[in-house]
Each structure stands twice: as structure tokens, then as C-alpha cells.
Amino acid sequence: MDDKRTLLGLLLIGLIFLLSPYYYEWMGLSPKPEGPSEQDSAETQQQAAEKVPVESNPPQRLEQPLQVLTEEEKPAGNELGQASGAALSSRREDIPTFTPRTVAVQTPLLDLALSTQGGTIQSAFLQQYTLPDDGRPVQLIAPQRSGLTVRLQQIDAVEDLSRIQFEPSREKLVVNEGQGTLIMRAQLGGNRVIEKVFTFYADRYAFDLELRYAGFSEEFDVLLGWQGGIPFTESAPDSDLPEMGAIATFNNERIEIKVDNGERDSWDAEGDLHWIGARSKYFLSAIIPTEQARYRAELRGDRTGSSPIPNYSYEIGRQLSSSGSWKNTVYLGPLNYDNLIRYEVGLEQAIDFGWPVIRSVSKFLLIAFKATHTYIPNYGWIIVLFAVVIKIIVYPLTHKTYESAGKMQELQPKIAALREKYKNDSQRLSQETMKLYKEEGVNPISGCLPMFLQMPIFFALYNVFSKTIELRQAPFALWINDLSMPDEVLVGGFGLHILPLLMAVSMLIQQKMTMKDPKQAFLVYFMPVLMIFFFWTMSSGLVLYWTLFNVLTIGQQVLVNHLKK
């Protein structure tokens, strides 16, 4: 379901609840009363070590390690393009043909394949996350795309290194503990050399990428990019699409581009870049510069082609001297809040928790849910417990609401008399009605207060249940096998969502218990139907919470009626 439509629907629901007391007053009715972390344990690492065989051959170092060249060793003239953009573009003609090879890199968390053609990442599998349909590891490289491409630019000349041969320092790298290094080296002609130095770690999804360069005659720009965004990882692509995009934190501002079908968009700027990347619903690829400099950043999105996967890409660039190095950190992994905050560059902003107030509540709820999960290893039961706690917190407020509703019912004859007396003077009618409320100690909008408290929690829960990876593929009980997705039971080949129907029934019972006048029947039956429409494709965790809250409200109403008798 489209994110904008969902939020619009939620706002409409809240608006209906907030305005309902005025509707009742206008109609002469009484108001309704309301009602895996990044650092693995030693045991996990030991299992990973048993799963992945240790490399038998020791790593082979490059025969000629990269060294910064002296002034006498530097080539004369414009070595990057011989002072001609056209000449630079055609220099690849004299490159000998070669057969690209694949260099495998394995850690307990990542399974990567790097190509000697361009020194790029051709596949990136996450060892601890699987696809819901077939159980294969999640792949972060889209088909026919690659990661960490390099382009060199000087004036109007651009040299793309994606077809250049990068000779690896080893044919395979396995890191079961600690760290391991892989060097991929390209000889560009003359004394010009580019090296990609990868440092991988056993306990993290991020790795270091250092670009070493030497032999250039003058300053030039290096552009490091990622093509194709992230492919679909969920069983329902429609749940992935609204969250896909290219994103960056630039000059302390969150920048994101998203494109609909048939659209393309781009953004570029130069300045203070904290990180840049592409995301799906639950996963992120990002480049984090580790040095203070003025960076060029570009985000692109394209959905004009026939591919069902949006083509998101990003590029980061900076100016370099004739020789030296440029260091970055590359993150390939889940949108796990605890992992992201470790990098202290605002990488957690890749998770969109909504407006500032909602964002704070969402983060608090996520932290509380994860802390509780340490003791209750089922998020479904955590939702049950959370609904009970929230109901206890708002109980005094809803109890006051019921008392106010009873008083409003008692005042209906007096209000009707005022309407008859001042039927031709609406201003005087309003004044006398408010005077009556004040004398009797009745607040006509008290029915809104429980919902006013509930709405920020509801929006925050929507973000937590639909956008955080902790609930991905998290089962509860019976037919509810993924709290982040709508529940589904196949009936005659049709996917029936049971929870929204149960939620509507509970809401209908709740409202019929409080209906005092037959004129209220329209809203009593209309609201449950409307809620089915909006909740039909929402996460089962959110619908479960709302249903439980309705059931608890029914129990509260039964208790109030019993005490009143």
C-alpha cells in the first residue's frame, strides 16, 4: 500500500474521531465514549567458522606494492587525458582483452563476489537474512548492476574504470574472526596506478575501502558510485516499493528521492556530506566518507524502463592530488537501528520514523520492544502486553470520558430546550449551551482526549511495525506468521485477512454498547467498515494491537456498567 495513501487514511481516521463529538452535539446526540545484532556472540562466530571453510592457500601479495611517486617519476603532460577529452574517451581501445575473474569474500555476515573487471561488487548476500519465499540469503545487488564503480574526471574528460582489469592480491578471502584485507590494482597506462584496498571484518556489515592512487600529473576528481539500488527482498513487492529510494545526509539535512512508475529524478550538490546510499524497506547500501572534505554527491532515480525494480543509484566524488589515498566506509546490511547509530554520522536517518514528535515516540517504542524481547522472545506477546499497559495508562482518562458522556446524556433535554428557545439565534444558542456545560461541569470534547493520546502512539506503532527489521518475518501464533505483513488465510484461492475483520467486529460491539440513540446507528456501522478498508493491507502487528485495545475497551465498559449498577 502506498505510504502517502496510508498516512492520509490514518489522518482521516483521526479526524473522524476528533470531530465526532461536534457531530453528536450538532445532531443532538450524546458523545461516544472512547476507548540479529551486528556483533555476533562467540557461539555464532564459532558456527560461522564451522560453516565456512578456512582458506587453505595463504594470501599472495602484489609483486609491486603501490608507492607514492617522486616528481621525477611522474609522467609529463596531462597523463589523465593528454589534454583532450576525446583522446581520453578513446584510450580504452588499446586495452588488451581479458577474461574477468571473480574474487570471493566471505565473513559470518557477508558473502560477496568482486569482479576483476572494474574491481566492482557483483553480488552481496547477507548470511543471516533470508528471502521469505525460498529461504535463500538476501541479495543487495540488483541484476546486471554493480557496486563501487570508479570514474576519473578532469575538466571535460571522464574515464570510466568499470571495464579496466583490476588484479587481485588473492583469489579468495575468508574472514572468520578479526579482519582481512584484499587489494585490487589497476595499471592505467604510464605510471598511473589505482588500487582498491578492502578491509573486511568478521563482526560487522561495514568494511573499509581505501582508494590509493599514484602517477597522476595534476589534481583530478574521483567519483565512487553504486548502480541499481537494492532489489526486492520481500514476498510482496508492493511492500518494498514505497520505501525504496536514494538517500543522503547532506549539510545536516536528510535528502531523499523517490520515483513513481514512468518517472525519473535526480539531485546533486557539493558540500558537507555525512553519508550517501540507497535503501529498500529493510536494507541499506551506503558510502560513509571518513575524511573531512568538500564532497560532490548525486542521487538518481529512474522507473521509465520495463524493469519492475526501480533503478536508484548514487555517486560520491572529491578532488584528489596527483598521488595519495582516499578512505571511506561502506555499509551493506540491514536497517537495524542499533547497528546504524554506531557510526555516529546520522546513518540511522535512513529509517524514516515520520514527523519529529512521532519520530521520538517511534524510537522510544522500538527501544522498549527490543528490551522486552530479551525476556519475551515473541513480539506478538509483547504487543499483547503493550496493549494492556497502554489501556491501564489511559484508563483514568477514559473513565472520566464515560462519566462525562453520562452527564451529557442527562443534559439532552435541557440542550433540546435551548435549541428550541434560540433556534433563530445561533450565536446566543452557542453561548447558552457553553454556559450550561460550565454550570454542570461537563466538557463536550472530553471524548476526544483518549483518542488524542492514542493517535501519536498509533502513528509510531505504524512506523515500528512496518519499517523496522526487528519484526520482519517475526511470527506470533496460529495463522499470524509475519507481524510486519498483513495476515492472510487462503479461502477458495482468495487471500482473506482475518485480523481486520476481527478488529471491525470488536469496534462494532464496542460502539453498540455505548449507543444511546438510534440516530447514532450510521456512525456505529460506518466506522467499522471504514476501518476494514484502511487496515486491510496494514501490518498484522498494528491490527493486532488495535483489535486488542478494542477488546480491552469492551471489558472496561462492562466493568463500568457493572459498577454503575
Image (spheres, rainbow, N blue to C red):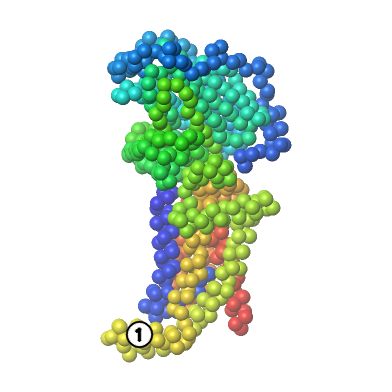
Residue 55 at x, y percent in the picture:
66, 20
Which residue is at a point 41% across and 65% down the rendered structure image? 15
Which element type, helix, strand or loop, lies under badge 1?
Answer: helix
- Taking 187 as reference, is 531 above or below it? below
Residue nearest the viewer, comparing 557 with 469: 469
Residue at (54% x, 73% y) in the render: 398
Return the x and y of residue 492 as percentages of the image width and height: 52, 47
Q: In the rendered view, would you say 73 is above or below 496?
A: above
Camera-side residue: 80 or 442? Answer: 80
Marks counted in the figure total: 1
The residue depicted at 43 percent of the width and 35 percent of the height is 293
How far from the left and from the top, in percent, is residue 426? 30, 83
Give the image quarter of residue 297. Answer: top left
Relative to 102, say whether 562 is above or below: below
Residue 396 seen in the current view = yes
Q: Position of residue 294 (x, y in %)?
A: 40, 35
- Quarter the C terminus occupies: bottom right
Q: Which amino acid, by three-letter code, is at mark 1?
A: Gln
Taking depth in this image into account, of 206 and 505 the one nearest to the observer is 206
Residue at 56% across, 59% down: 545
Q: Which residue was labeled with disc 1? A: 431
